[in-house]
Structure formats: C-alpha cells, structure tokens
Amino acid sequence: MKTAISAVKAPSAIGPYSQAIKYGDMIFLSGQLPLNAENGCMPDGIEEQTRQVLENIKFVLEAQSLSLESIVKTTVFLKDMSHFAKMNGIYDKYFRAPYPARSTVQVAALPKDALIEIECIAVDANKKY
C-alpha cells in the first residue's frame, strides 16, 4: 500500500503530485526545488539553491524519522552543467561514504526557473518485518 508523505517544513507540491510516496520500506521523493517553505522565495546562485534543495529533502525525510543516510539514489537536474563543480561541493557536505548512487543531467528548464532540482529514493532500514 502506498502512503503520501507531507512535510510542513518543505515547500508544498506545485502540482498534482505528492512530496513523497512511501511504498513498503521505499520512499520516493519527488523532485525538490530550492524554495523556502516559510516565505516561498528561492535563493540566488547554485550553491545556495543546492543547499536549499538538500534541506528540503532532509525535511521530507524527517517527516518519516529518516535522514539523508537513508538515501540510496539521487537524480540531480541542472539547468547548466557548468554549475556541476559548485553543486558537487555543496552536495559533498551533506553526504558521506558510502554515497548514494547518483545521476546528474542538464535540462533545458526547471519549474520556477530554478537552477537545480533533485529527486531521490530512500529506504527505511528501521522497518520491522
């Protein structure tokens, strides 16, 4: 059975989708934009936007008593691949080995004209069977 996950600290979905879905011990997070849930603003610059996206991901996972360590796969969408090194520098501060598997792709555009969006898959390793 799938269950929608909603975190008050993370920005609300801007369309007909859930912030995340839990199915068994898997949590599938929708792409997170660099929006601040409190004021709806988006920071400037790739480093600040990367930080905000990763904080939003943390908020959604915390709604299930999980952390970034629960993530097994991320997909990073960049508006401009020239931002890769700066994004990677911030990303590295949020994760430690063993790092999640990751794909990074450049896209033509992102919602709200964001510079970055990240989606991920996490596993609830605390689930009792």
Image (cartoon, rainbow, N blue to C red):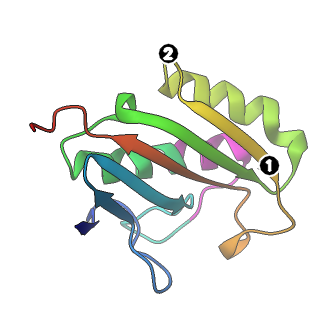
SS at circle 1: strand
Image position, residue 129 (x, y; %): 10, 38
Q: Pointer 2: residues within 10 angstroms few (<14), some, or many (20+)? A: few
Q: Residue furthest left?
A: 128
115 relative position to 41: left or right: right
The residue labelled by disc 1 is 105
Query: Which residue: 35% across, 33% down?
Result: 70
Residue 10 located within the stretch drawn in magenta: no
Q: Residue furthest top?
A: 97
Image position, residue 67 (x, y; %): 31, 35
Corner quadrant of residue 43:
bottom right
The numbered mark, 1 or 2, whose residue comes first in the sequence reads: 2
Image position, residue 69 (x, y; %): 37, 28
Corner quadrant of residue 71:
top left
The residue labelled by disc 2 is 98
Quadrant where the image shows the N terminus? bottom left
Identity of the amino acid at label 1?
A: Val
Query: Which residue: 34% across, 48% down?
Result: 26
Is residue 90 or residue 106 the one in the foreground? 106
Distance of mark 1 from mark 2, alpha carbons? 21 Å
User: Magenta residues?
Assistant: 42-52
Say if 16 sits above or below 108 in the image. Answer: below
The secondary structure that most of the magenta stretch takes on is helix
